[in-house]
Image (cartoon, rainbow, N blue to C red):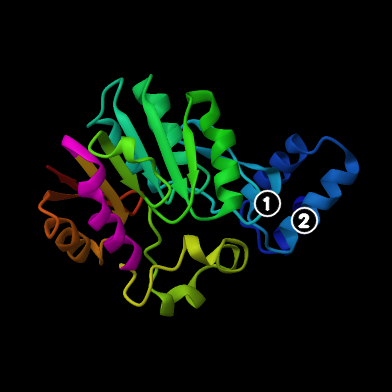
Amino acid sequence: MADRLRAAGCVFAEDEARLLLSAADHPARLAEMLELRCAGHPLEQVVGFAEFAGLRIALAPGVFVPRRRSEFLVERAAALGTPGTVVLDLCCGSGAIGAALADRLGEVELHAADVDPAAAACARRNLAPYGGTVHLGDLDAPLPRALRGRVGLLVANAPYVPTGEIPLLPPEARDHEPPVALDGGADGLAVQHRVAAAAPRWLAPGGHLLIETSERQAPATTALMADQGLTVRVEQDEDRDATVVIGGF
């Protein structure tokens, strides 16, 4: 099995083979999973979960795979929260960030939203243990009005890849993750701009908005948030190539 994976271009073939063996409940299922992986499907989608921030996050085919760099967003947000905080995860995907925050902070009021029905279904599975509510719709459009002015932590790993750079992404992402989770518009900032504009409607006094971005785009993301009256700073983790812009009222 490892030989087939290696021939298909899997750098960590032995590790992947062990994971496939542990995830398959029947020889026929193992054969199916092996074919999918050799065809280029993301390993996490094939086995049905991703390891993220110490949690096992359920995934389904076609759902964005949480990246290790996003653990830095979780860490920065958790440092600003306390038990009882109202947490809102926009562009939530599988709900990995919201789940990790709830796991770290303890009892929170957790809300998440995504426009992709497959992602929202995954998020419901992953947030159920924390009593989280997942809203299906475009950014903050489906959120209940009662949430306005109450959010202590608004986190967003909004898509920030410029449209023209989508063809440069690895095939696993380009071919098997939804464009809506990757494409940030011409400059990569289109969705971030909308998140920043929405934040004042939902943040409580003393609340914070945290947006994952790239090092290159951080100055522009900072400007978007400053335009909304937030006091902004940029934090980075070079080891994970992670950049988070944090704004507070």
68 displayed left or right of 19? left
Q: Residues within 10 Å of mark 2 (few under 14, many from 20)?
A: few
Nearest the camera: 154 or 203?
Answer: 203
- Whether residue 152 appears in this view of the structure is yes
Mark 2: which secondary structure? Answer: helix
Q: CA distance from mark 1 to mark 2?
A: 7 Å
* Image quadrant assignment for residue 21: top right
Mark 2 residue type: Asp
Instruction: Answer above or below: position of 87 versus 9.
Output: above
Image: magenta residue range: 190-207
* Residue beneath disc 1: 13
Nearest the camera: 2 or 235?
Answer: 235
Mark 1 residue type: Ala
Q: Residue at x 37, y 27 (%)?
A: 109
Nearest the camera: 80 or 138?
Answer: 138
Residue 95 at x, y = what percent? 49, 41
Disc 1 to disc 2: CB gap under 8 Å: yes
* Image quadrant assignment for residue 173: bottom right
Q: Residues within 10 Å of mark 1 (few under 14, many from 20)?
A: some
Residue 148 at x, y = what percent? 27, 39
* Residue beneath disc 2: 3
Residue 39 at x, y = what percent? 74, 64
Q: Main secondary structure of the magenta part?
A: helix
Q: Residue at x 37, y 20 (%)?
A: 106
* Image quadrant assignment for residue 184: bottom left
**Labels 1 and 2: the sequence-earlier one:** 2
Mark 1: which secondary structure? Answer: helix
